[in-house]
Amino acid sequence: MVPLTEARGDRRLPSRESVRKQALRSLDRLPPFSPILNRVLASLAKDDVCFAKLGDLIEKDTVMAGNILHMVNSALYARSGTVNSVRHALSLLGIGKLRNAVLGMSIARMWNQVSMPSSWSMARFNLHSAASAILSDTLAQRLPVHYPEGAFVAGLFHDVGQLLIALSLPEQHELILGLHAQGDRSHLECESEILGLTHPELSVDALALWKLPEPIQVAVRYHHDPEADPSPKSYVRTSRGEIPLSRVIDAAHQYVNSMGVTIRLNQGVEPADPRRVESFGLEPARLGSILAEFQTEFDSMAPFFR
């Protein structure tokens, strides 16, 4: 029989297993994935993305179609002439940018339908997730990264465990925030003390239930501790010199935090090192170009995540 409570420090708190079960049950309270989102997520496991079918799905979703056209016609993309059709927009954006836009906008729209406690800002969560996803993907397309096609999704979902904690365990969420506000421990350490587990573990459980590819799950699990990522030992396809995806997610997450695009206004001692992206050995000019491209894409998509 699984114990309902455990003694941790001077507190009597829910057991690790009961926390996990309660958090995962809250997935049933989330809106179902849209046909577009299901199609794009399914494409992560294979290379045969059918743009004709995806275009048809987008055209049937008037909100998504409008958002895609608004984004591609924004001043940040500097197109000459107005783009009036989804198919034209798809040809201009290309497979990567289109997939990123659809995933990000679909997930933000889904999260915004969820009733959350007052201490949780869905707008901040959406912006942090989107920024981490965009920068992760931008880096992964220019570095020898293991499973680069999963970078955007790993960045987008890396903190979904935090959302599940706030949604399913509001009292424990408040305890975590209170402990973190004392300022001497990271949010991760506070989660471990109060819950007996951390949000990366819950994030991975959710991704497993959603049947996302294992490399994405591993990257999310180790995004706070990429040195512990077993990917080079676990995946036969990983060749010498490849960068674990978790390291890219960690660098992007920290850079985004350093911009002030954080889940909480008071991040306390959360890691926010903008120099982590320099550890990949890119030439300064090339890194500057990557960060400028990230900023442009983030600025074009940010209005859809607020």
Image (spheres, rainbow, N blue to C red):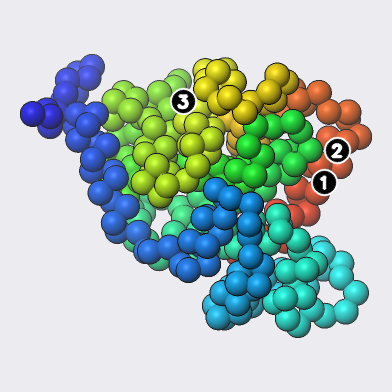
Residue at 22% from the left image edge and 19% from the top image edge: 8
Please provide percent x and percent y for residue 233. 55, 18
Q: Residue 130: x percent and y percent?
A: 60, 51
Structural crowding at the residue carrying mark 3, measured as other residues with C-alpha within 10 Å and reported as few (<14), some (14–19) or many (≥20): some
Numbered tag placed on residue 292 in the rendering: 1
Task: Tell me the quarter of the image containing the C terminus.
Answer: bottom right
Q: Residue placed at 51% from the left, 27% from the top?
A: 222
Residue 203: % across, % down: 42, 39
Pointer 2 residue: 288
Spatial CA distance of label 1 from label 2 is 6 Å
When asked about the image quadrant of residue 188, the answer is: top left
Q: Nearer the viewer, residue 257 or 223?
A: 223
| Residue type, label 2 | Gly
Badge 2 marks a residue whose secondary structure is: helix
Q: Amino acid at mark 1?
A: Ala
Residue occupied by mark 3: 186
Would you say the residues marked 1 and 2 are in contact, meaning their CB atoms lie under 8 Å apart?
yes
Which numbered disc covers residue 22? none
Q: Is residue 114 above or below residue 88?
A: above
Task: Specify which label sits upstream in the sequence, 1 or 3.
Answer: 3
Left or right: 231 as drawn, with respect to 301: left
Q: Are marks 2 and 3 in contact (CB under 8 Å)?
A: no
The residues bearing labels 2 and 3 have C-alpha atoms spaced at a distance of 30 Å
Of the 4 image quadrants, the one containing the N terminus is top left
Crowding near pointer 2: few (<14 within 10 Å), some, many (20+)?
few
SS of the residue under disc 3:
loop
Q: Is residue 176 above or below residue 49?
A: above
Q: Amino acid at mark 3?
A: Ser
Q: Tell me, yes or no, if residue 165 can be seen here.
A: yes
Disc 1 and disc 3: Cα gap in Å? Answer: 30 Å
